[in-house]
Amino acid sequence: MTLPVALTISGYDPTGGSGVNADLKTFQNLNVYGMSAITNLTAQNSQGIQEILNIPDDFLEKQLKSIFEDSIPFTMKSGMITSIHMIETITKYVKNYHIPFVVDPYIFSREGERILSQEATAILTKELLHHAAVVTPNLKEAEALTGIDIQSEKDIDTAAKIFLREIGVKAVIINDSNITGKACDYLFTKNNSLTLTEEIVDTKNKRGSGSTFSAVITAEIAKGNSLENAFKKAKRYVTLGLQNSLDIGKKDGPINHFIDIE
């Protein structure tokens, strides 16, 4: 028996709501075999991140070498990256192995604390993003990557043009739940655009929603589906995951990763 294989490169969440933990649950629920390379160990829970421990610089390289020497994944995605060295290491593998690559940029914590320095963000933008099949920032991350203030849908269009024409990404999906008062996701490619809109789900339990969204896209591309269809499935998956979210922990619980989307 064989399955599509997807690789996630991100941080470890001991309470299971985000990062590689969320990605692997999502991959498995979509019948994709998940692999992972850890960038960071975190002490975090529903109340926030207490501490982040970067793995040694050479250890991410060793993990990726072990994976790619044994079995090349169909697709790969990145989440929490916290150093220039990590960016350079991932870039090397993306350039050497021409497989679809999804970047879920993790620049700020959910409490708003900056996780990726401005210098590292500049390197991410210059060296890595143009290798991605799709980049999936929220509004704040899109602002940090494009350098513009986003206050309207027109600004979202402007940011998309910067991603596509100046940064050189193949596609970008910008998430917004502030400007329109709806849960909107905007997909832009060089030739087309598509907006998917749902009502905002009234729940405090949203942990891992960004990781899960990009993980669905990664898994669906691994299965041979188009980016547009992967985008539609990711939107539906996260909406259902929020509607059936899990009340685990004292504050912000996780999205439900085990939704039956069918």
Image: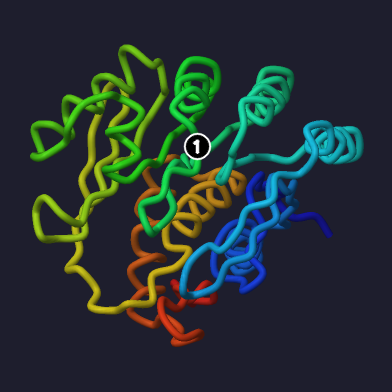
73 sits to left or right of 162: right
- In the image, residue 210 lies at what x, y percent? 43, 55
Which residue is found at the position 38% from the left and 29% from the top?
171
- In the image, residue 117 lies at what x, y percent? 48, 32
Which residue is found at the position 64% from the left and 57% from the top?
20
Depth check, front residue: 10 or 173: 10
Residue neighbourhood size for the residue with mark 1, other residues' Cα within 10 Å, grouped as few (<14), some (14–19), many (≥20):
many
Q: Amino acid at mark 1?
A: Leu
Q: Quadrant of the N terminus?
A: bottom right
59 sits to left or right of 222: right
Circle 1 sits on which residue? 116
158 sits to left or right of 259: left
Which residue is found at the position 9% from the left and 53% from the top?
180
The answer to whether 36 is drawn above or below residue 149 in the figure is: below
- In the image, residue 168 lies at what x, y percent? 40, 15
Q: Quadrant of the C terminus?
A: bottom left
Instruction: Specify the farthest residue to the front.
Output: 50
Name which quarter of the figure residue 163 lies in. top left
232 sits to left or right of 5: left
The answer to whether 249 is drawn above or below residue 36 in the figure is: below
Instruction: Specify the farthest residue to the top.
Output: 166
| Colour treatment of the image | rainbow
